[in-house]
Image (cartoon, rainbow, N blue to C red):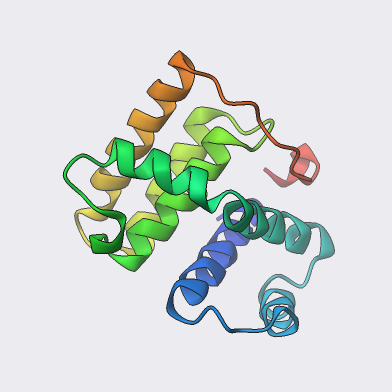
Amino acid sequence: MTRRSRAREVALQLLFQFDSNPSVARPNQEQFVRDRLNEPVLELFCFGLYDGVQSNRQTIDKHLTDAAENWRLQRMAGVDRNVLRMGAYELLFAPDVPTSAAIDEAIELARRYGSKDSPAFVNGVLDRIARARNENPVPKAELPLPTPELA
């Protein structure tokens, strides 16, 4: 597992935790990330993903709802929903993240933490978002990303 993959994994854990318990204080989240990553550049990347999803959640959830035919966001498994949110964030807003990398990383997280059907579901939804994005580009926000050697 690459170091950025590990940071994505921890960001997913934060997103899942927020879904279950939105009252967890930021200092507790920071300690959780420090304990697991113990590297400032990766911690920054992790929180860039987490904060990016949180600040763009409404837009991301709209894209997910449009792309996930016959699935309401609330009915999706929590892991799938949050893997999709993070993958959609990288597709729609993160600069310098290739489409294939964003989708592949999300599929791997779904494979590791979701059900047996999660990887295919995540792949299908994110592929639809990527195609829609290519037809109607959305300006990407700035996200502090670590140097390329961490990829």
Residue 68 sits above or below residue 42 on the image: above
Q: Observer-nearest residue: 45 or 23?
A: 23
Q: Position of residue 120 (x, y in %)?
A: 24, 44
- Residue sitting farthest toward the left: 70
Q: Position of residue 106 (x, y in %)?
A: 44, 48
Q: Is residue 105 visible?
A: no
Q: Is residue 74 left or right of residue 37?
A: left
Residue 39 sits above or below residue 108 on the image: below
Q: Position of residue 3 (x, y in %)?
A: 66, 56
Residue beneath the point at 52% across and 74% down: 18
Residue beneath the point at 56% across and 40% down: 90
Q: Position of residue 151 (x, y in %)?
A: 67, 43
Determine which quarter of the picture holds residue 54: bottom right
Q: Is residue 94 left or right of residue 126?
A: right
Residue 43 sits above or below residue 69 on the image: below
Residue beneath the point at 69% across and 85% down: 28
- Residue sitting farthest toward the top: 135
Q: Is residue 135 visible?
A: yes
